Amino acid sequence: MSDTFGELAEIAAAPRPRRARRTRALPPAIVAAALIPIALIALPIVYVLIRSADAGWTGIAAELFRERTLMLFWNTSVLTFSVTGLALVIGGAAAWLTERSDLPGRGLWRVLFCLPLAMPAFVASFAWKSIGPSFQGLGGAILILSMESFPLVFLPLAAALRSMDPGPEEVSRSLGHGPGATFRKIVLPRALPAAGGGALLVAAHMLSEFGALSLLRVQTLTTAIFQQYELQFDNASAAVLSAMLMLFCLPVAFGEIHLRGAERRDKVGRSAVRRRREQPLGPWLWPALGFSAIVCVLALGIPFGRLGYWLIRGVSAGRGIEAIGPALWGSLSLALPGTIVTTIVALPLVLLALRGGGRIARIAERLPYVVHGLPGLVVALALVYASIRLLPAVYQTRAVLFAAYAILFMPLAQSALRASAELVSPEMEDVARTLGRGALRAFVSVTLPALAPGLGAALALVALELMRELTATLILAPTGVATLATEVWSLTSDGAYAAAAPFAAALVLISGLPVYVFTLRTLDPGGRGRKRRPRTG
């Protein structure tokens, strides 16, 4: 297979006129498969519109212009912009220090800056909240969620800074431009898509965050939707707030397209990246070390320290230990199949947008990002609504829960898959077809192996999120099935911090593996950490 792949790569790499990406005819099976995620994404959108219509125009206007709605909109806006801005500053500074400066111990700092991903936001919130009530409220939420979210900016930005060809920067310096001007004119424009993509992911997370904000007693559109459904059974008002939240998500969903641009990035074969000279920190060495230490203390030291404190008390009290095994099995039995389903469902949608072309295909690919901002509760209720009326046999089964996972976390799989799919040259499939292979066989034998890095990253990223998914699991999990996340939520909601600590520690430990895989994939996409034999000839 590798020889065949190499021959096709050499043929496809032959000199040819440069042109824009043109559309390719996809196998009919892939086009048909792309209709499945589109149908899934349409469900919550249609559900929200139907329920909003129940309120009527008068009810919609009354709900939108209530004082409480304006307060929810303000809190959501402040939280989203503040956390995203802080994540950009912290993640950007951390990425530059570890990839471009001579900061001592950069390998260790890279690992430490990635580790907050293993700590679910609601677990970190529970750890901070257990210190005292001063960390509750909007200010505390901004601090805690910024510390837990900045790795989403750090990882892609560090990977981008590491993989940049140093040639343009060397040319800029040779023309007399200083480090500041070179960074502003050469480095920043090339790093902007990675930083922007990470920032948009942080913003989408803030719009849909529920567990952490509920623990910290912060009222946003998402928490209000949950209260409307659960406490007041007011579906119409909750649907109006959900529609408002979807409108809020539109700039986030389509902003990524603007940042990414239309540049063609596919390539054939791997290219070597030359080493660049590290930027001496000079008198800024100690401030840089201080900044790194403070970030790690806030993002890791305090949450893990408080978790350890409550873990010791929980173990000594002997409470909850017997339920860890069933909860761990519940997490694995739901997260692993859900990860595979989500990744498989996302793949044809990515290929349709990249290869099928056309405005409709691109809009269809963006819709999951819009729905990603919805609370899991809304998606769960939409699936309950649809399954009872259309497929009552699947109601209260794992199939409905896996569908909810796919709807909620499809964008994560899409982002990872798209990064690999953009690097696969469509001409390679054309070459395979000219050698006598059918469309589907050419795709399976040529394109699918080239997508393996993206598939691995998608599986790791989705598995990480599904391990700690809360709201959809609370509503749709089959009767009697509990997960580590639902047990932590149940116990912390009752103030039983010591009893919740063993479940939270197990959740952090089991999240560590996908974090390791995703970090390795992002910061070392070409396996540059491994020694290679020099190529000759």
Image: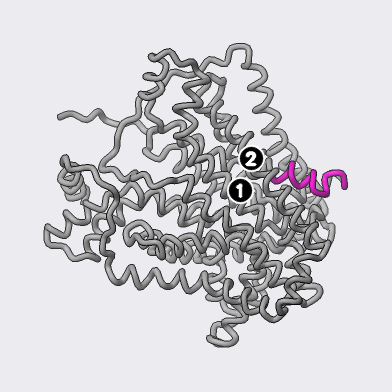
- Give the label on residue 202, or none: 1
Which quadrant is home to the C terminus?
top left
Task: Determine if the magenta segment contains residue 108.
Answer: no
Q: Could you say where residue 389 lies in the image, as x and y percent from the top left?
A: 58, 87
Q: Residue at x 47, y 26 (%)?
A: 185
Give the residue type at disc 2.
Ala
For the magenta stretch, what is the residue range?
Answer: 133-145
Magenta span: predominant SS is helix
**Mark 2 in CB contact with mark 1 (< 8 angstroms):** yes
Q: Is residue 307 left or right of residue 253?
A: right
Q: Between disc 2 and disc 1, whose residue precedes?
A: 2
Q: Could you say where residue 516 lies in the image, as x and y percent from the top left?
A: 52, 44
Task: Determine if the magenta segment contains residue 141.
Answer: yes
- Give the label on residue 519, or none: none
Q: In this figure, which residue is indicated by the disc labeled 2?
A: 87
Give the residue type at disc 1.
Val
